[in-house]
Image: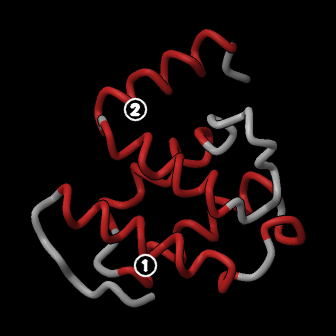
Amino acid sequence: MPRTRKQILEERRNLKKEYGELFESVGNLQFSADPIGINFENNTDEYHPEVGTILPRLRTCRCAQDVLRVTHEEFIRWFGAETAGPAETYRQIASEIWRLWSTRNGSELDSQP
């Protein structure tokens, strides 16, 4: 059953509450890197749906390479393989997400995807 707009917005509010500044930081990072070319300068929340599916999966990541895999998988899920492009496109994004995640959780593990 498809979710309503109200349900989607409520889920996003809950994620923002749970992850705090990390949610905005990852969204800003993706918007700035713009791996699929949807940054039109005034749509700063454009990558928030993807952030909302990436962040919960970070709990399973043990290194930046894991974050690269998760990030690429989520972009493929949202946009398809052709639009998402190769995993390499997300290497710098994944490294930065891992740094942010590690800092938030008080550990600095392998930072090279």
Label 1 sits on residue: 66
User: Which residue is the extreme one toward the right?
Assistant: 82
Q: Secondary structure at mark 1?
A: helix
Disc 2 or 1, which lies upstream in sequence?
A: 2
In what quadrant of the picture does the N terminus appear?
top right
Q: Which residue is at the front of the view, 39 or 101?
A: 39
Q: Give the residue drawn at x 89%, y 71%.
A: 82
In the image, what residue type sits under mark 2?
Answer: Leu
* Image location (x, y in percent) of residue 75: 69, 61
Q: Quadrant of residue 113?
A: bottom left
* Image location (x, y in percent) of residue 9: 57, 18
Q: Is residue 2 above or below residue 99?
A: above
3D distance between C-alphas at marks 2 and 1: 21 Å
Q: Give the residue drawn at x 67%, y 20%.
A: 3
Instruction: Specify the label residue 5 is tagged with.
Output: none
In the image, what residue type sits under mark 1?
Answer: Asp
User: Which residue is the extreme one toward the left?
Assistant: 106
Q: Residues within 10 Å of mark 1 (few under 14, many from 20)?
A: some
Q: Secondary structure at mark 2?
A: helix
Q: Give the residue drawn at x 41%, y 42%.
A: 23
Q: Quadrant of residue 86?
A: bottom right
* 33 lies left or right of 52: right
Q: Which residue is at the front of the view, 57 or 25?
A: 25
* 27 lies left or right of 3: left
* Image location (x, y in percent) of residue 93: 53, 70
Instruction: Specify the label residue 15 is tagged with.
Output: 2
Q: Residues within 10 Å of mark 2 (few under 14, many from 20)?
A: some
Q: Give the residue drawn at x 48%, y 24%.
A: 11
